[in-house]
Amino acid sequence: MQTTMNAPLIKSTPTKAYWSAIFSLFMGVTSLIAAEFIPVSLLTPIAQDLNITEGMAGQTVTVVGIFAVIASLTLSPLTKNMNRRFVLLSLSVLLLISNILVALAPNYATLLIGRSILGLCVGGFWSMASAVTLQLVPAKDVPRALSIVYAGVSVATIISLPLASYLGHIIGWRNVFFLSALLGLIALIWQFFSLPSLSVQEGSSFKNMFQLMKQNWVLMGIGATIFSYGGYHIFFTYLRPFLEHNLALQSNILATVLLVFGIANCLGTFIAGFLLGKLFRATMVTIHLMLLVLAILLYINNGNLTVNMILVILWGFIFGFIPVGWSTWITRTLADKAEMVGGLSVAAIQFSIGLAAATGGLIFDHFGTHGIFLCAALIFLFAIAFIKTSFSLFAKVTGKLA
């Protein structure tokens, strides 16, 4: 395998599937997202050890989002002459450095530097994921391949919430990050031996990226992405307070529910690969309609514990479709510009998550979870409208269905 920095050596549409490479990307996604959200379950010990407030420790998640947006918008144009294999391996090396730097951090400044490096990895890796997948499997296998890659998000949710919290009590938060570094090292080695040379997509420039945004159906699709992720995360961000305070779950039951939530999310991701490949448009509309209905049911439910638990787990299951769905949208409609759209999409997602957390915080403080559920339902209503409009405009412009 060559790790050259220059020009493409394989076709954009392969005749065979590189499944080992796809699973190496799954491992990479798992490592990245686990590292991003591990601090969520370790805020207290991190704050105590570095003599900072929990609020300051919480900013270690925020800084990742900020640098992820920067990387997602700039990586493709800035590396337009580099072989994508080299870029991916470089990002995996940076992930390793980030985790080690955080694990050894003697002070808050070093901690933030390590997390900033992670943000560059997250934004860069995500922005390239769809474009790289197109070069690793034939067109018919793309939805399935994407579902495998994005299953890493679900597995990372399990690692970063209940597992990291449990291990943090036993071996300390620094050793948890060393384990995260080990996970990243496995991903790096796997990618080194499995990734073929990956071609550069032509036209990856800042000018072409902004030209793309002038197309109404693309703009509506990015808007739909923002509402889609926003509707989910406005509740997910406050899932733990809902389970702890509204449902009064004890810590052991809470950890179990979070674990089941992650498993359901993972299951949804795998099923998404099959449904989206056959019924893309119908599935995209249906899953957002289902999330809208779930939000309403959570709002009107009168505190029945069993019903609430089922609704929460269904929420996690259906969200498994969303990352795969929007990546499939890119590969079906803008395959030749997947890197640029991937960058725009990641920026939109990070913006959406941050806005949902901020908006959700204000609503939660004033109206509690009932206000969160109503807001989520309204957001999903907008998501459905934007999705249908984007698909309709795409068909009108291209004469094809998304």
Image: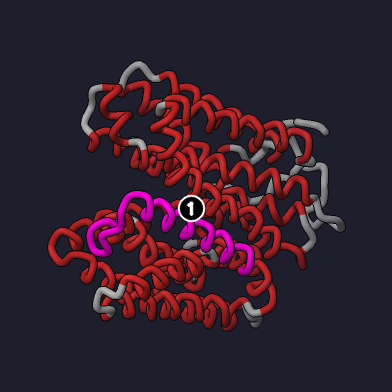
Q: Report the label total.
A: 1
Seen from this angle, which residue lies furthest top?
106
Can the viewer see residue 48?
yes
Specify whether 200 is left or right of 121: right
Closer to us: 214 or 354? 354
Q: Quadrant of residue 298?
A: bottom left
Residue at (82, 46) in percent of width and height: 10
Look at the magenta stretch and give its main secondary structure: helix
Measured from the top left, where is residue 89 in percent x and y?
A: 66, 33
Give percent across and percent down for residue 211.
Answer: 51, 59
**Camera-side residue of 78 and 29:** 29
**Up-down relation of residue 2 to residue 400 (above or below):** above
Tell me if residue 39 comes above or below residue 350 in the rendering: above
Residue, x 43% and y 18% (percent of image)? 104
Q: Which residue is mark 1?
A: 346
Which residue corresponds to the image point at 62% horizontal and 50% vertical from the top-left?
129
Residue at 39% x, 20% y is 105
Residue 279 percent across, percent down from the top left: 64, 79
Q: Is residue 53 left or right of residue 342?
A: left
Relative to 25, 357 lies left or right: left
Q: Residue furthest left?
A: 366
User: Which residue occupies the foreground of this view, 316 or 188?
Assistant: 316
Report x, y in % for residue 80: 63, 41
List the single residue furthest toward the right: 15
The amino acid sitting under disc 1 is Val
Few, some or many residues within 10 Å of mark 1 (<14, 14–19, 20+): many
Residue 74 seen in this snapshot: no
Q: Range of the magenta residues? A: 244-271
- Answer left or right for 192 relative to 304: right
Quarter of the picture holding the N terminus: top right
What element does badge 1 sit on? helix
Residue 270 part of the magenta-drawn span: yes
